[in-house]
Amino acid sequence: MPELPEVECWGRRVAERAVAGRSVVSAWAKADERIVIDGVSPRKLTTALTGRRVDACHRRGKQMWWTLDRGPHPLWHFGMTGSFAHYREPTERPAFAKVELELDDGSFFAFADPRRFGRVKLRDDPPNQPPLSELGPDAYLDLPPWAWFIQQLARRRTPIKALLLNQSFLAGVGNWIADEVCYQAKIAPQRPAAELNDAEVRALRRTLKRVVGKACDWEADYTRFPRTWLFHRRWGKNTDALTARGEEIDFDVVGGRTTAWVPKVQR
């Protein structure tokens, strides 16, 4: 599942470079696609996009939307396997394309999704309508101050990892980010949020800011992540998995998700 850094770097930034300031000359949508193209007919979607200028490309959490010169405005969600593609020749249309736009510079921009977990929607006022209106602050662009975290965590008994994964609490944090943040902040993912002391809450926020910020700075290129990050060792549920420092990694289920953590480090 793409997380915030992938959606920011491979989604919003790709769209911003390709379509921001450009007009849609024509639009195509797969005529029988009624799952990915959600809540609107393919024909209505193409009609809404054709002739419109894209003024800006936005993201909150894992949701993206464009502001057009006139509504309704498109929302894009990658799901597990959705992606954008920008290309020059119509023959380069990606396999499993669901929507394709011809832009006024002669290039093409497509949304593809082989497994059909992604979604394309139309909204008149995206930030104030679901799904965007149901999201919490963005973990990259709008991370609240530590005092907000203190206040919010104090009244929640849910495990801290489960709370981090709750998109209505904080938008964009997914499984590997939550595990990485808990590991680097030295906080056990199973601990009730309300039990964290002020110093631990400060460490949690500081680590979240650093991990998400660095992942976006590095364009979600995992080969650039420091070798000491848990990210490189958390996959596969290996019974003999160790961190780069030689610490034993355990695998539990927290918040309904497989969780990698290091009992020797995290308390």
Image: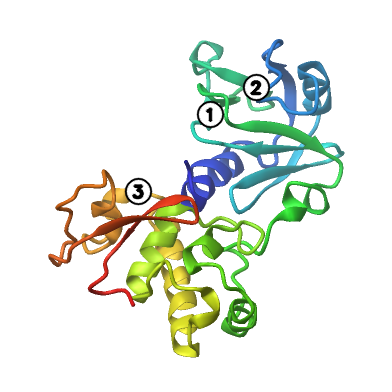
Q: Is residue 101 above or below residue 122?
A: above
**Quadrant the C terminus occupies:** bottom left
In this view, the residue in front, 50 or 79, is: 79
Q: Position of residue 128 (x, y in %)?
A: 82, 53
Residue flagged by tag 3: what amino acid is it? Asp
Q: Which mark is residue 198?
A: none
Asked if one can make out residue 217 in the rendered structure from this viewpoint, the answer is no
Residue flagged by tag 2: what amino acid is it? Val
Residue flagged by tag 1: what amino acid is it? His
Instruction: Give how far apart the Cα atoms at labels 2 and 3 are.
Output: 26 Å
Q: How crowded is mark 3: few (under 14 residues within 10 Å), some or many (20 or more)?
A: few
Residue position marked by numbered label 1 in the rendering:
86
Q: Residues within 10 Å of mark 1 (few under 14, many from 20)?
A: many
Q: Is residue 25 left or right of residue 79?
A: right
Q: Where is residue 188 in the image (x, y as percent from the top left)?
A: 37, 71
Q: In this view, does 37 lie to the left or right of 129?
A: left
Asked if one can make out residue 137 in the rendered structure from this viewpoint, the answer is yes
In this view, the residue in front, 249 or 76, is: 249
Residue position marked by numbered label 3 in the rendering:
221
Which mark is first along the chain, 3 or 1? Answer: 1
Residue position marked by numbered label 2 in the rendering:
99
